[in-house]
Amino acid sequence: MAYETKALFRDDAYLSTAEGVVVAINERGGIVLDQTNFYATSGGQPGDIGHFERADGSAIQIAATVTGETKNEIIHIPGEGQAMPEIGEKLVLHVDWPRRYRLMRMHTACHLLSVICPFPITGAAVGEEESRVDFDLPDASFTRENVTERLMEMIRENTPVTTRWISDEELAANPGLIKSKNVRPPMDSGRIRLVVIGEDGAVDSQPCGGTHVSETQEVGEIHIGKIEKKGRENRRFRIRFGSVPLF
């Protein structure tokens, strides 16, 4: 049986603490709640870790968060040897915020990179220290230095980052919103979440269920660490925190 969890992070990525009630524990010991602020692994972004606080003050450490039979079923995986809650128990949910915030900054940087390189995306992975975005990119004129410079220009402009929802029909009428070459957003729920950068999407709009910062300045210092050739027309850009190393 699939359960539906209200995903609080979709409307407020900054909700580091929330409350949830246990509705199920699956056969593998995964905890399903009525609602959660824990992001589940999807779209190249890792799921959250953290802990659940019980009424007696004890903690259940959460080692991973994944989706179940559907994207709307969110399963929290306890660490080894953790006590299990009871069905109906109310918990206080604490996301590992420093880790989540780094992922939010990185994910936003990946969106900015897709503006600088307006080519089909063939793969992506968001990480705490390094992220990668692969483009179907025949043009080899992009360099680490010029892409980094353009990224930092966009970050310093401090453009707002927001979300909005559109219908399946609106997405079908605007196929250019989809940047991924191989993956299409799910279109069976009746609505699609867009991440919008700039007023009315002046910088970018694309379907995404991930978590992002609210303005580009929060991304901070970032650079392209490497551009790798992964095929005749495929380039992998590696994004790293910090300024470009001197050596």
Image: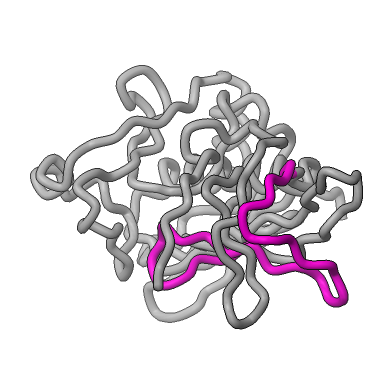
Q: Residue 229 location, x and y as percent?
A: 52, 74
Q: Is residue 129 left or right of residue 124?
A: right
Toward which corner of the image does residue 92 lie, by quadrant? Answer: top right
Q: Is residue 243 visible?
A: no
Residue at (34% x, 41% y) in the render: 193
Which residue sits at x=21%, y=58%? Answer: 188
Q: Position of residue 238 (x, y in %)?
A: 63, 60
Examine the structure image and report whether residue 49 is included in the region drawn in magenta.
no
Choose top left, top right, bottom left or bottom right for residue 86: bottom right
Is residue 126 rendered to the left or right of residue 111?
Answer: right
- Which residue is at the front of the view, 5 or 152? 5
The answer to which quarter of the image holds residue 153 is top right
Q: Residue at x 40, y 48 (%)?
A: 208
- Along the line of sight, the residue nearer the viewer: 69 or 246: 69
Q: Is residue 195 visible?
A: yes
According to the image, what is the colour scheme of the structure? one colour
Q: Position of residue 161 (x, y in %)?
A: 48, 27
Q: On the rendered image, what quadrant is the N terminus found in? A: bottom left
Q: Residue at x 61, y 43 (%)?
A: 37
Q: How many marks?
A: 0
Range of the magenta residues?
A: 65-93
Above or below, comparing residue 167 to residue 39 in the picture: above
Quarter of the rendering occupied by the C terminus: bottom right
Compare residues 233 and 135 and report the one nearer the observer: 135
> Is the residue 79 above or below the residue 177 in the image?
below
Q: Position of residue 173 (x, y in %)?
A: 8, 44
Q: Nearer the viewer, residue 54 or 180?
A: 54
